[in-house]
Structure formats: structure tokens, C-alpha cells
Image (cartoon, rainbow, N blue to C red):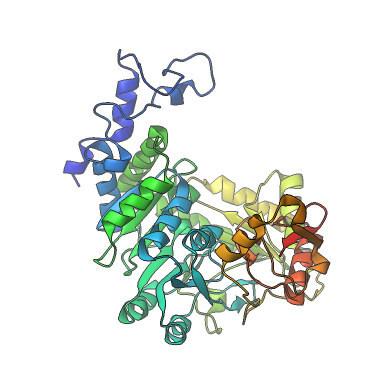
Amino acid sequence: MERLRKLNLYDTLVTYGESGHYPYHMPGHKRKKNGDILSDIFQIDITEIDGFDNLHQAEGLIRQAQERAAELYGAEESFFLINGSTCGVISAILTVTDKQDTVLIARNCHKSVYHAAFLQELHLRYLYPEQITEYGISDAIAPEAVEAALERYPECKAVVITSPTYEGVVSDIRRIGEIVHKKGKILIVDEAHGAHFGLAESMPENAVRQGADLVIHSLHKTLPSMTQTALLHVRGSRIDRMKLRRYLAVFQSSSPSYVLMASMDACLAFLEKNALSSFAKLQENHRDFIQKTKNCCHIQIGEMKTLQGKNCHLAAWDICKLVISVKGTSMSGQALYDMLKDDFNLQMEMAADTYALAVMTIADEKSDWQRLADALLQIDGKIERAEIERRNPKEDGMPPTEMTIAQALSAFYERTPESRSEVLVEQAQGRVIADFINLYPPGIPILVPGETVTEEEICQIRRNLDLGLHVQGVSEKGTVWVL
């Protein structure tokens, strides 16, 4: 590690930006400070010039930065992603599959997994997480469910799991990995929301060290790094790394941002020095917050220990994700979200049917946690208890699949614009959906192209719309595209 610290991408860029070298190269701002608010960033925004390496054939500064990432996370090899976790997920799936292969995925995977399925014309088999009814969120994926699914679908080439989920629920990746590898399959873990895992004893272990073959991390979600920065880690001999590099070159820009790469490198350097103290402070702030909000009569904060002894599969719960539940009250998650924003100037990450979600990181100070706790205590005093029946999303089975995503989208776009079918949500029952329908965030599909719409999906979509949630794939007129 000491050898790898000698050259630092960010510091080298700053030094170069302050030098007398004039840029007869891209970008067009030429690193000049013209009073623009981004002038400081312009100083370190360059292209692939001598001495600054090339992301797509890293041999110098960038290679050493990636080696530092691999050492920090326990990977054999790590790659910088400047197109976010999305390009890492797509590259990982295309690396381990061929056209029209079959893959086993958790139904609550991010839409990038489904986009990879479209590109590779994959057949999908699903793992449906059960529900944690206490908070109205999806449970972890049970290892036993993975084993049963692979017995039922032995043709699956790979397994794709999201852990932690958007709400912070962590699956037992070690056991799942053992099952997957015993069956001769490959395990990909979308750990985009867990880039902080494994960096301190107070955090859950990361999927890299638990035996996953390919792991994707979004640095920007929970760590001090710029939006669109991510990492892809490889461990073991099951992955064709030459093929992986080829797909990363395909799905990433040929003009990678040095600003983003410098942000990643600076983030990793910060973690090397400050991870233990930073996460110790985070854990202390979380503990104090939980203690303060215990005085709420109606609002509940999701906690691991409240589920002990319950029939749940989660291996851990990420303390960076605060599930602020109003289940069983007269208030919806969207109403809570709106009140926090409008009355207290507190912008939550997202709203769902029965909860709002806050993302907390090592950048949040004690006062930031206190401000949210105070707001929740005030809101709690205005809530009335009223058990409102809310139907959970489908837990078993799935919408009937008539064709693959690729087949459905191809059939749809082969039609002329005038002949494409658009119907009201309520009229879509029995039709094959031709677009992704999902809440965003988090981007987990309710329906994917090629599935037949049933009454259950219509009720779920209508309920989300009535609550004021943002449902992608449904127009302002309340219509959807169908075949």
C-alpha cells in the first residue's frame, strides 16, 4: 500500500493545473478561469495526455489508483467506473452470459439488470423476496430460495442479487455464494448502496470478501465522491477478465472524466486514513438518533433488533439507511416526505407507500441527525393512529411472461408510431406490457416488457399514483404502452 500512495491522481492533477503547461487539447475550456462557477474544476479537467494514463488501458496513475481500491475492498482487481454502477452491472452480466442465456435474478434488482437482459436477449428467472411486514419493505433473499431456484432452473448461467437493497436490507452473501458456486454458477452482487461495507468493524462485510465473483459499488451513494463514480471488483478465476475489459470499454465513455476519477482516488485516500474514526462517529450518531426517536408514538425507525426472532432472512441492516415508517397510521409515506420537505426543509431520498427513506453518511454531523430527529418528533405529535389496509406488492409468483424483454421491445418498435397501442392503466389487464413500469426511485420494476398485466399490477400502479408517488412508464394521462 505504501508503494501505491506515492502517486495520487487528484494531487497530480492539481499540480499540473497550476503549472505553466498550456492545453492544446480537449476540453474546450482550456483550464482557464473565466469567472465561471466551475473554474476550479476546469483546472483539473483534462484529457488523456502524457503522464496521466488512460482508463481503458491503465498502466500508470489510474492503474495504481485502481490497485488501491482493490486492496481497500479485498478484491483481486478493481475498475473505476465513470458511467456509474449502471455500466458496471451491464458489463458484468454481458461478460458472464451469451445471447439468449438464462439468468436467475432477484425481482427487486435495479433496472440496469433488466437493460442488460434486453441487450443480451436473456431469459429471466426470478427470486421474489418476502416482505418485512413490520415496515412494509422487501426482505433479504433467502439462501434456501436461491438453492431451490437453481434446482428448478439448472440452465441458469449466473445469479444476480441486490444487497443491500435500497432500504438497507442485507442478504447472506457468503451462504448464497457457496450455494451458487457449488452449482457451478457465477454470482454477481449489485452492492451499489454498500460501498461503505467492510471498511470498519461496525459495518457489514462487503460482498467481495464474502465470495461474490463480481461486485459493483457506487462510491457516490454513501461516500464522499462525486455523482456517477463507482467501482467494479473481481475476485476468483470464474470471470474472463479480457472480456470484462472489452465490455467496460463499450459501455463507458471513450473520454473518461479525470475530475470523476480524481474524485474516486481522493475518496479512497480519505478512507484509508479516516475510515475507522468516521464510521465510529456514524455509529454513535445513529445510536443517539434511535434513542431520541424512541419517544415517537406513531413513527417507527427500522431496526435490525426489532426483527430478531421474526421470520426474516436479512443478515444485517445498513445504518446509513433510515426507513421512517408510518405504517398503520393516517399518514402515507409520501405525506411524511412532503411534510419534511415543505415544513422543515429536509429533503428525503424517496417516499413509498408506508415510509420515507433518509440516507445518512459519514458526512452528516451530529446536528444533522438532531435536526431530523426533532422534526420527526414534532410530526409524530400530529399523526393519528388509524389502521389503513395497504396491500403489499406481490410476494409469490409473478406476472405471466409471454416473451423476453428483447422480444417485446423489438415487437413494439417494429410497429409504426401510429400503430403502437397506448391504453389507460385500468384497461391494460390481459395485455402484454411494452415498457418498464417502476417507481423511481429506486427503479425496481413492477412490470417489465413482455409480461402480461394482471389485476394485481393494475391495483398496485393505481395505488402508487393515488399516493402521489412517481411511477415511470405511466404517462400524465394515466396510460401505458402495450402490445
The image quadrant where one finds the C terminus is bottom right
Which of the two residues, 207 or 49, is positioned nearer the viewer here? 49
Instruction: Say whether residue 381 is visible.
Output: no
Which of the two residues, 141 or 276, is positioned nearer the viewer here? 141
Q: Position of residue 193 (x, y in %)?
A: 48, 57
Q: Position of residue 317 (x, y in %)?
A: 50, 68
Residue 69 in the image: above or below residue 435: above
Give the residue displayed 63% in from the left and 62% down from the top.
411
Asked if residue 301 lies left or right of residue 227, the reply is right
Residue 189 in the image: above or below residue 441: below
Q: Quadrant of residue 242?
A: bottom left
Q: Position of residue 109 (x, y in %)?
A: 53, 65
Asked if residue 9 lies left or right of residue 289, the reply is left
Q: Position of residue 451 (x, y in %)?
A: 65, 71
Q: Quadrant of residue 332?
A: bottom right
Residue 79 in the image: above or below residue 124: above
Which of the two residues, 10 or 155, is positioned nearer the viewer here? 155
Which of the two residues, 470 or 267, is positioned nearer the viewer here? 470
Give the residue displayed 28% in from the left and 61% down from the top.
240
Asked if residue 75 lies left or right of residue 203, the reply is left
Give the residue displayed 59% in from the left and 67% down from the top.
302
Instruction: Say whether residue 431 is visible.
Output: yes
Q: How many marks?
A: 0
Give the residue displayed 43% in from the left and 48% down from the top.
251
